[in-house]
Amino acid sequence: ATPSWRSGCRPCGTTRWSTTLPQVRTQPPAPDGFVKAGPTPFEAAALRAWNGNGAVRLLDERPGVLILERAVPGTPAPDDVVLASALRRLWIGPPAGVDWPVADELCERWARTVERVPSVGRVAAAVFRAGLPNGERVLLHGDGHHGNVLDGGRRGWLAIDPQPLVGPPALDLVPALF
């Protein structure tokens, strides 16, 4: 049987479903939202921490499902300035009480992944293996590319689909290179 929250939904991309929300009760009631099944680890915690500042708002959550503020699908950030400006709004001190993934601990895995990318892979891998610079550590989006910053209408450009982790701010812009 189709879950009640999915009745009346329409496909949005290849694996996501979206709907306006008269059939999903949220507290407080949401006039328009997006139902996301299977959120990434730490996604709800990050969206709560950002509280709509630079990212879509978390309207409600249930086990395995997030109800998010709607941003306009198919309207990715048009350039690097818009992308960087949207991501910068997310860079806050990591909220306590969450065992956030830490970028420094992921560098070797990233190095093995990016070294396969033609033209920039070896250089990027060497940078990751050299280690991240000392200094400020903030909550990062973690997958900051143009397709993950969408037009939020009156609220401006908003990040979606975070893969949150803690690290130096400049690291948040690396996914836009690939």
Image (cartoon, rainbow, N blue to C red):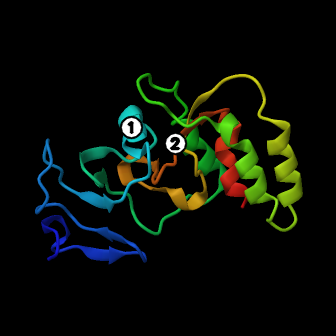
Q: Is residue 147 above or below residue 135?
A: below
- Check whether the beta carbons of the residues at disc 2 and disc 1 lie within 8 A of each other: yes
Element marked by disc 2: loop
Query: Of residues 126 and 10, which is closer to you in this image?
Result: 126
Is 120 situated left or right of 4 in this image? right
Q: Is residue 30 above or below residue 51?
A: below
**Image quadrant for the N terminus?**
bottom left
Q: Is residue 147 above or below residue 2?
A: above
Percent position of residue 91, x then y: 55, 32
Percent position of residue 137, x then y: 63, 26
Q: Earlier in the sequence, mark 2 or mark 1?
A: 1
Percent position of residue 60, x then y: 23, 46
Check disc 1 and report the residue beneath it. Answer: 45
Kindly tell me whether residue 64 is visible in this rendering.
Answer: yes
Check disc 2 and report the residue beneath it. Answer: 164
Write the residue at 49% across / 49% down. 162
Is 163 situated left or right of 25 in this image? right
Query: Of residues 143 and 38, which is closer to you in this image?
Result: 38
Write the residue at 36% across / 49% down. 154
The label on residue 133 is: none
